[in-house]
Image (cartoon, rainbow, N blue to C red):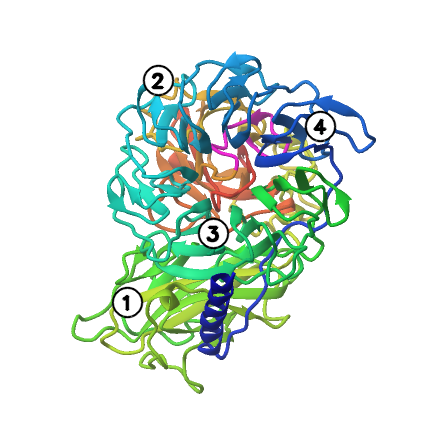
Amino acid sequence: MFRSQLLRWLVLAVGLATIWGATSLVVAQAAVQVSPSASPSWRVNGKVSATVVSGDTLVVGGSFTTATAPDGTTAPRANLAAFSMSTGALLTGWRADTDGKVLALSVTGTRVFVGGSFTTVAGQSRPHLARVSLADGALAAPSWQLDGDVMSLESAGETVYAGGSFLTLGGLDQYRLMKLEAGTGAVDRTFFPRTNGPVQALQLAPDGSRLFVGGSFTTLSGLSRNGLGVLDPATGEPTATVFPYSVSPTLSLAIDDTGSRIFAGSANVNNVISAYSTATGALAWQHVADGDIQAADYYDGTVYFGFHEGDGGDTTVRMLAADAATGAIDTAFRPTFDAFYGVFAIDAGPWGIAAGGVFTSVSGVPAQGFVRFTTPRTSATTTLLPSGSTWRYLDTGQVAAGWQTVGFDDRGWSSGPAQLGYGDGDERTVVNSGPSTGHYPTTWFRTTFDGGSTAPTSLVLSLMADDGAVVYLNGVEVARDNLPTGTITADTWALTARAGAEESAFRDVQLADGVARAGTNVVAVEVHQESASSSDVSFDLALRGATTASSPSSSPTSPVSSPTSPTTSPTSPTTSPTSPTSPTSPTSPTTSTTSPTPPPPTTYVPAGTAWRYWDKGTRPTGWSATSFSDTTWASGNAELGFGDGDEATVVSSGGRKSVYLTSYFRRTFSVPVLPTVDLRLSMVIDDGAVVYVNGREVARDNMPTGTVSNTTRASTARAGAAERAWRDFTVPRSALVAGTNLIAVEVHQDSTSSSDLSFNALLRTP
C-alpha cells in the first residue's frame, strides 16, 4: 500500500510539473460519450471476465450458472451467454455452455472465439479454446487440444491470436502464444514466440503492423521485456521497441485509432494505467488507482479502465475514463460499484460501454456480473479535428504575411498526416529541418474542420508541440505555448527546450466561445524551436467541442426527396445554380421563372444502382483502370455501406472498432453519343472519396491533396445529416469516351474507430 501511495504522489508531481511548465494551458476533461448511469439489463449470478459486442449482440463470459431477468425470470447459462446490447435482454436462442471459466472473447466476422479454463463446450471436447456462431452460439470445429488456459484473444479479418498459460498444442510445443486462421482453424506453426510467464493481454495495431503482448513475463523470445512487448504479427519475431516503465504483470491493453499510443494496465503494487508511444516506448502519462488495473479499452479519444479496491481512497469507484492524449480524468464519469473486486472486462464502441466483473449493482441499478452504459451523455462533445489529421505545412524557414488568415492560399504548401516533425522517428510526415548547421526556428501548419450548421461551443484544443507554438483559429490567436509574449516572428525561439515524454505530451486549452463558426473553420499553427541546435520537431493537434451536425443536404441542389430517382425530384440538382460544392455548368438553365423548361437530363448512372465493390481493406493494383478485371469482386445495389441500418448492401467493415480505412467501388456505364456539356455527379459520401472516370481523377471530396493509399484518412468526420447529404461535382465531358465507360470510387473513413460508411452516386447531364 505504501508503494502504491508513493507512486500516486510521484505521478501527481510529474503531472503538476507538466502543467506548471505550460503557463498558458489548462487541463480539460476527457470526452465520454455515455452517461455513468447504468442501463437496466438481465444479469448473471457470478463473475464476468470477458465482454465483446458485435452489432447488437453482447456476449459475456465468466463463471456463472444462471441468467436472471429484471422481473426475476431465470434461464440456465453456464459461463457463456448473449444479450441484446440495446435492450439488455437475454438472447434466448443463443447458447454455448462450458464446463469451466471463460476468460477471453473475440469476434471476427460471424464467429466468436472463446478462451478459458474449460474442457468442454456444448458437451463436446474443446480444451481451453473454441469457436461458436455469433448468430446462435452453435459450436464449430475444430478442437485445438491445448494443455493450459487461454487468457487473451485478439482477431482481425481472418487471423486470430491467442495467449495464455498453455505450453503445448496438440502435443507439440507452443509456448503461451499461437496464431490461427479464423475460417479453417488452421494453426500457423511458423508463428512461435515464447514468454516465460502467462500472456494475459493482446492488442493489434489498427493497421495490423504490430502485435502488442502483455502479461506476467519478463522475457519475450529470449529478450528482456517486463510485462509488455511487441511482435511482428506475421512472423512472431519480437521488435526492438522497449517500454522502460512497463510492469509485470500487465493485465490489459488498448490502443488509439492512429496506432501511435498504447495503454497498459498493470497489477500488484503498481496499479497503474500507462500511456506509451508505440514508436519509442516513451511514457506519456500515468494514473494510479488503489487496485489492479484489470481492464482497459479505447474509443473515440477516451481510455476506459477498470480496477478493484477504489481510486484515491474512494471505495465506490471501480471504473474511470481518461483523455487518451493527456490522461485527464473525466470527473463526471464515475459510476459506483458495490463490490470490492470491481471491473475485469470493458468493451467500448459506438454502441456504448459493456463492462463485466464482480458486482451486483452499478450506480444504484441492479447489474450483477455485467453492466451496460448506453444512455447518451447530454454534455458529450464531438471530435471536430482528430489527432493524426492531415495538415498543409511550410518548412522553408520563411512565410508570407497573412499565412494564418482564412483567405490565405496554401495550395503551394506540402501536406501530410500528423504527427508531423523530424528527429524522433515517430513521425508520420517528416518535415524539412533546414540547414544542418542551424535548423529553422519555425515551421507552419494549416488545416480546416467543419463546425456544423451552428457555431460549435465548449471547445477544447489538445496540442503537442516541441518546443513551443502559437495556435490561430480563423485568423485569431487562441493559444500560446512555451513562447514569449509580444509579436512572434519567423525568428522567435521557444522559451525552453522540451525532452523525453514532454516532447510527445498533449496539453489542453479551453477556448472561449465565439472563436469558431458554423461551416468551414481554419486552424493555423506555428511551431518554434528552442534553438538552432535543437534536434527534433513534433506537432499534432486535436479539437473537441459541442456542435450540431452540418447539413449540406439542406442545399437546394441535393436530390434528397428521392435518392433512388433523383431525375424526377423537384429539388434535383438541375433546379438550382447555388450549390456550394459544384461549379455551375455554363450550359445550366437560368432559374428565372420566365425561362423555358429545360430538356430532361440524361442519366448515365442512376442512384441506387448496382456496383461491384472490394471491402478487404487492401488496395488492388490498377483498380481504377478500365483494363482492370473486377469479376472476383462482390456486387450489390447502393446505398452501400455499414453501420447506419439504411444500406441496400452491407459491405464489410473489417472489424468491430478498428475498421478498414478504405473501400472500393466500380461500375461501367454506356455513352452512345458524347454529350456537349459536362456531367453532374451527385454523391452521398461518409466520410471522404476520390472519383475516377476511365482511370482519370475527376473529383475529390473531404480528402487531403497528394497521393492517396488504402491507409489515407478522410480529412474530417461526418455525422448526422452530413452523412446522408448529396454533394455535387462536375465531371468534364473530356473524361468520357463514346461507348463503354468506367466510374471508380474509393471511399475513405476519417479513423479506424469510425462506426459507419455510406456510398451512393448519381451521374447525369445537368
For the residue pair 315 and 661, the one nearer the viewer reads as: 315
Give the residue type at disc 4.
Answer: Ala
Q: Earlier in the sequence, mark 3 or mark 2?
A: 2
Mark 4 highlights which residue?
Answer: 67
Q: Quadrant of the C terminus?
A: top right
Residue 644 included in the magenta stretch of the image: yes
Mark 1 highlights which residue?
Answer: 536
**Structural distance between the alpha carbons of marks 1 and 3:** 37 Å
Give the residue type at disc 1.
Answer: Asp
**Structural distance between the alpha carbons of marks 2 and 4:** 34 Å
Q: Visible in this render: residue 726? A: no
Judge left or right: residue 607 versus residue 562: left
**Structural distance between the alpha carbons of marks 2 and 1:** 51 Å
Judge left or right: residue 235 versus residue 542: left
* Local SS, label 1: loop
Compared to residue 629, the image places residue 325 above or below, namely below
Give the residue type at disc 2.
Answer: Gly
Q: Residue 723: x, y in percent? A: 60, 43
Circle number at residue 170: 2
Q: Earlier in the sequence, mark 1 or mark 3?
A: 3
* Magenta-highlighted residues: 641-656
Closer to the eye: label 1 or 3:
3
Q: Earlier in the sequence, mark 4 or mark 3?
A: 4
Q: Earlier in the sequence, mark 2 or mark 4?
A: 4
Circle number at residue 268: 3
